[in-house]
Image: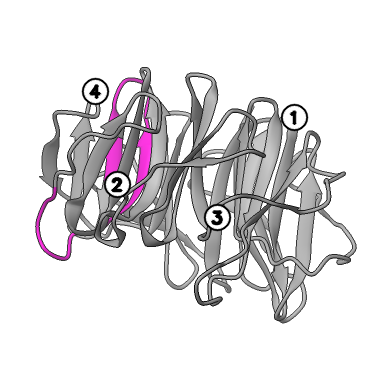
Amino acid sequence: MGLFVAVGQQALRIASKDGVAWTHEEIGKEGETLRAVAYGNGIFAAVGGFGWGDQLMAYSRDGLDWHITPKTKQTNYRSLFFGQGKFLAMSGDPGQVGDAKPVVAVSTDGIAWSEPKRISGQWLIRRLAFGNGVFVGVGDRGRRSVSPDGLEWQDVPGTKAVDTLIDVAFGSGVFVGVGMHGLRTHSRDGLLWSEPERGLEGEHLNSVVWARDHFVAVGAGATWLSADGAKWNRVPNQDAPLTCLFGDGAFLGANWKGRILRSPDGVAWTQVHKCAQHVEGLAFGAV
């Protein structure tokens, strides 16, 4: 059985079997934020922070009954990804001038986590994809990085802040990155990227997913579709979310404040639920 899970501000947790009817909504303490959630090895894991710096980690075996682990480390996690049989939680200080001191923590079960490890590079890695035997990360100020294990990272040299990628996905042997003003680019190894293509001013692409046989990049005003990451078709969209995923034949997304949206194609979106708190992350798993 497939299950969608959403997490967010005030440690929001909520689940849905079909992406339409949402149940088991739970709220935590004021100041707690779960920023990301992922599914792997039979478990949902979520990460975030409390207050100015304390970590917030949670896990669930069924997506309904959640356990929040003790807050012991001064690390406010900002992104989470599952690949190569493990979870990677990424963090750092985005407000630090000149060096955000990025770190990564690793877990195979979403329960026991490694100590935060300082990784190379100056800027945060915010989104990840895994394919062709490597992790590819994109982040602040144009950062693009490649890692064989999620611990040792190699930055792509000479990237520009104007070409910052907001999200990255892998499918059919290709990584695709998207960003502001319809920015699209692709790569097979995460190091050598195609020349950036752009769309209309203000049509920022906030999410890209691989949906069975094609890429779907969702932005403000338009959704871009591509089978290979190189040739794209722009389709005007309706009420698009700020973040989205694909699972069980449907697209799920979230927008301010607490709105959960569903779409059959990534183009026409319909609000299906409104949470009391803002949704920060979504995941799908076969529980």
Mark nearer the N terminus (1 vs 2): 1
- Real-space Cα distance between discs 4 and 3? 26 Å
Q: Is residue 15 visible?
A: no
Task: Look at the numbered disc 4 and give the secondary structure of its residue.
Answer: loop
Percent across and percent down for residue 117 are 74, 51
| Residue placed under numbered mark 2 in the picture | 178
Q: Are marks 4 and 3 in contact (CB under 8 Å)?
A: no
Label 1: which residue?
Answer: 42
Mark whose residue sits in front, 1 or 2: 2
For residue 128, above or below residue 278: above
How would you rate the neighbour count of disc 3 (Cα within 10 Å): few for under 14, some for 14-19, many for 20 or more?
many
Residue range highlighted in magenta: 198-217
Q: Which mark is residue 55?
A: none
Q: Earlier in the sequence, mark 4 or mark 1?
A: 1
Q: Who's the residue at 42% across and 52% down the image?
A: 143
Identity of the amino acid at label 2?
Val
